[in-house]
Amino acid sequence: MTSQNAIVGAFQLDGSELHGHAYDAGDLARRLVVEVLVDGWPVDLARADAFSSEAATVGDGCYGFGFELPDGILDQGGEVEVRVANTGEPIGGVSSLPDRGFAGARASGQVTWAGGLRLTGWVAAAAANDLADVTFMIDRRRVAETRAQGFVLVGKEMVRRPKARFDLRLPQVYADGVVHLVTVADASGRELAGSPCAVLAFADGLREALAGSRDPASEDPRVELVERILPRSVPFGDVEAWCARHPAPAVSRGREALVAVLLLGDEVEASLASLDRQDHTSWLAAAVPEADGPATFDPTVIARVLAAERDLEVVVVAPAGTVFRPQALARLCGPAMREAAPAYPDALLTTPSGAVPLLWPAFDPERQLEQGYAALAFAAPAAPVSAALAHGAASAFVLFAALAAATQPLHLPEVLVELPPPDRRLGDVLAAASRAGLLSAAAAEPDHETGLPVVHVRRSRSRSGIAVAVIQPEPSCPDLAQVAAALPAGAERLLVSHRPLAPPAGWRNLVVAGGRNPSRLRDAALRAVDSPHLLLLDAVVGPDGAEALDELADRLTGGAAAAGGLVLDEDGLVVSAGLVLGPHFASASAFVGLAPECGGYAGALRVARSVGALDAAALLLDRAAAVAVGGFDAVLFPERCGAVDLCLRLRAAARHLVVTPRARFIRRGTQPVRERGPSVEAELAVLRRRWGADLADDPFYHPGLNFDDEPFTGLAWPPRALVPRRPGMVRSPTRSTSTAPVDSPRRRRVLNVGSGPRDGRPLPPPFTPEAWDEVRVDIDPGAEPDHVASLTDMGTTLDDGSFDAVWSSHSLEHIHGFDVVNALREFRRVLGPDGFALVTCPDVEAVAAAVVEHGLDHVAYVSPAGPITLHDILYGHSSSIQDGAAAMAHRTGLTARRLGDLAIEAGFDGAAVGRGDGYDLWAVLTLAGTDGAALRRDLAHSPAAFVLASAVA
């Protein structure tokens, strides 16, 4: 760094980009003009007034500058320097340009491995009108070629330029478990930065590759973590191979049910031919003529058909021409009967350009109103179908809405049907169904790629009760005229900043002390306004007309706690359209870089839909709901993860989040780009610990879609669990909630072994009284347990397989070492085939290390029974033993490894053991039938959550 005559500054050269900062230490309000020189010749000028992270603690931090140097200069120049214009004072030292070789082979782009066989990046064309082609070579042999399409902004901080973007998957033959070095070059043969790029992919995913080699690591939770963070995907065009390789779990045959298949329309030949190939199901089919448009019918006609079959149990509704895949009826009807609920599958849709996989979200009422996706093909129990018909349901959409109002629908994430091209009139029928529900609705042009219907639904057009807060962590005042024009008269208007600003008339400056912390600004705004709804806007984002606020307010009228729109750049391309939870065990923005009119995957970019989370760039909040769950956590998530955390807490409170494409916002110019650094990684680590499986599993994103940084662009290989699902609620960090609020799931039983006396304290999550029945067992009759028995022999009182979980808190250390495996065998015996055991006990390794440092009499912590010393942890609570409670003595000690080994010896199929923050071990013991995804959801906010996520925390 240079400091001369009060001028302070530095710069850095990164390829063709030069960026740095400069300021006058004697006059921090002054803004310098700097020039860049190559070999003493001036090349460019810039004003040093952009925000710079290197100077963030000086003045207002806005002393940054940036340049992009021309190609010819880089190829021929020798030294680069930056000086204050006119005065010539140097900024930093002199930087030498690297030797570029005989061909001036300067990197003309960048390539990055995105997991599996996928390579992404950008490339610069040699001239403005040239096509940006990219070639890929392995072992000097060309293996692939692609043309860059679309654009991406490339650069750091003040230097951001659009470049041609590419996205390619290498041929499947290279998914062989061998590391391949891929040379990537532009059309002129110049290698891109990052080339050669190392690629490692497995034909069936890392877990199955290890399983095939009999490596026990295939069951390690860390393998699943690797597959989450470095995911592999394949193109949508490979959907048939994907379906064949990753079928949904097998279903038990059970008894055969009689199914009525209602084919809506006339062209039924293909449907009947596919039904002839069904097995494990008895069926009858009826061609239902169109009444008043596609998917409409005379309900009395269908009612007579159903009434004629007294043994009928399930009804399947689908368009005429639907092809049912093998065993589709059995797989559709089984869950519908078991759950007594409507069930809808994924589908292949025939389009002029080929078959398109429609991999749906869990049931989303908002998207159903505007796209009707779940009613395209579905199954439901016969009785509620007959009841809905008796009430006049005259279209597939009205019928499905009546069923969904009674029981939350079930999504079956597997391709069971092939749908014919949708009738263009389907949108009018869907709009009529919405109007039947007393909503304003109008059909729009169908989705361009799929032909799926698009309907615009309205509840209310009122913008009253909205306050707006523009969040301005940097000390320059944004242009607020566009924002004000979209607001109703009298609306509260806040400009929220860390330092005093001079806002225009009608605005109030809310000053929040402290260093840069956008979450603190947003939370302060949330608590400073009186209006029921608060619109949060980043300083560079403004509404694209009053329609944006109308549309967001309409979604809150429908019961959402938060609503977001499309944030577009000045070229009209998507910057943000809701967040997908899961990619890289974090979140990713959906549809970035697309034009809204293209529709996105399965038309999702043209309809309102529920999402796992929203970002805060343009966010309308139900203020009371947001305050009730604690607002923005400015301590743990000051910069990047605060909105995701708040959204998850709103969902934990049974509220939903919506993004609507008709609320549009424009992001003006470019923001300082803050690369992911230690502070952001720290936020992500806390977010992962806090939310666990809820962060990884987004109900509104299909488990078979890709999990990298660009959601909705491919098929995950391997997919996550393809099991029937509902959206449910996430689990709060402070309280546990039902995962399926609409239904009343079977209550589960937990055995509390070595329970001790009943003291009124609840069991830890997930064992809440709302969902679990506790059964207590203890060897001491004075503890008044439900059963008096030893941990090592409960056979006389407790049946085999009679519990869903076992909870053992500091009980194993009270038995002899040779008996620990016997106790664990008893835990295994009483568990059902899909159960688990949650065990905690002292960590003798941690205690031993503390004894060496502090001595046996060191007080480790204070409990309700008084101070607990290291001696007490090792040998038992001395005061209790002295008072005659001999059973309180400790007779063995356990380390993480010993506990895990003994659990496997006792017959458990999996044992994940971790060391807690204090002097305890936590173990999660599982069986072959334990559902790993469900277990992670159960334990997401348990004290043992870190055991399953310790590799990422």
Image (cartoon, rainbow, N blue to C red):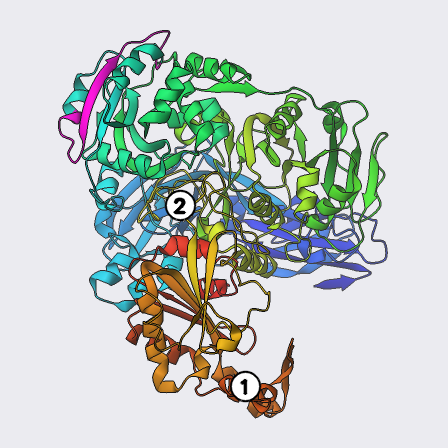
Residue at the farthest top position: 292
The residue under label 1 is 885
- Residue at image point 61% right, 88% down: 879
- Residue 148 falls in which quadrant of the image? top left
The magenta region covers 274-295
Q: Is residue 568 visible?
A: no
User: Residue 447 at what x, y percent from top left?
Assistant: 41, 21
Residue 548 sits in quarter:
top right
Quadrant of the rendered structure where residue 925 is?
A: bottom left
Residue 329 lies left or right of residue 85; in this view the side is left
Mark 1, Cα crowd under 10 Å, few <14 / some 14-19 / many 20+, is few
Magenta segment includes 280: yes
Residue 363 screen position, x and y as percent: 43, 34
On the picture, is 712 further left or further right than 547?
Answer: left
Three-letter amino acid code of the residue under disc 1: Ala
Task: Give percent across and percent down for residue 791.
Answer: 39, 76
The residue that mark 2 highlights is: 120
- At 83% across and 33% down in the image, what residue appears? 507
Which element carries disc 2, helix, strand or loop? Answer: strand
Name the residue located 69 percent from the left edge and 48 percent from the top edge: 518
Q: Position of residue 245 (x, y in %)?
A: 22, 45
